Image (cartoon, rainbow, N blue to C red):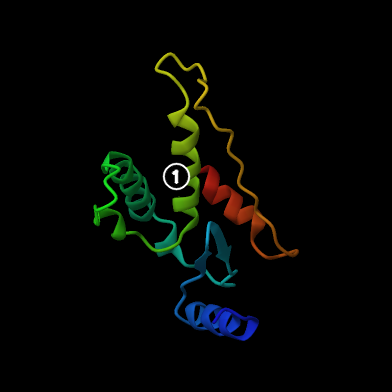
Amino acid sequence: HLHEASVTYSIRRRYQRDTIYTYTGPILLALNPFKALPHLYDEKSMSDYSHRGEEMNNISEDPESDEKEELLAPHIYGIADGAFRTMLAGIDPSGVPTERSKDQAILVSGESGAGKTVTTKHIMS
């Protein structure tokens, strides 16, 4: 059952394992680890999410396909890559938006000191 105590417990356990990102539906929750976690933001991590986005674009729309099950862990790079690919999907080869074009926005919210600026820098990288 989904209630405050179970959500808090789950997030606390993930935080203790330095797993600071969690999806709740299409929303990515991020916790400030209050320490450096360089492995989360290295070139390999960025490349993994970019390559996975390319693979997801190439997977057939076959509902029986189980290839989409091989997802990467929740991460800001996954959100950024998804927004970027969705934006580009509606642009023709000459760079002109088509009727399929969809504006994209990423909302980064939190209290003072929660890591909004750092998160935004990672999104833009």
> How many numbered marks, from 0 up?
1
Compared with residue 6, is residue 102 higher up or lower down, i.e. above or below?
above
Q: Position of residue 95 (x, y in %)?
A: 47, 17
Q: Position of residue 116 (x, y in %)?
A: 65, 57
Seen from the viewer's position, the closer of residues 69 and 53 is 69
Q: Residue at x 44, y 44 (%)?
A: 81
Compared with residue 109, is residue 90 higher up or lower down, i.e. above or below?
above
Seen from the viewer's position, the closer of residues 38 and 5 is 5
In which image quadrant can residue 31 be found?
A: bottom right
Quarter containing the N terminus: bottom right
Which residue reaches farthest top?
Answer: 94
- Relative side of 124 to 57, left or right: right
Q: Residues within 10 Å of mark 1 (few under 14, many from 20)?
A: some
Compared with residue 91, is residue 42 higher up or lower down, i.e. above or below?
below
- Relative side of 112 to 20, left or right: right
Q: Position of residue 114 (x, y in %)?
A: 67, 65
Q: Residue at x 60, y 69 (%)?
A: 32
Which residue reaches farthest right?
Answer: 112
Q: Secondary structure at mark 1?
A: helix
Which residue does the numbered mark 1 point to in the structure image? 81
Seen from the viewer's position, the closer of residues 121 and 27 is 27
In which image quadrant can residue 82 be found?
A: top left
Question: Of the residues shown, which amino acid type is indicated by label 1?
Answer: Asp
Q: Residue at x 52, y 78 (%)?
A: 15
Q: Residue at x 62, y 86 (%)?
A: 5
Q: Position of residue 3 (x, y in %)?
A: 62, 81
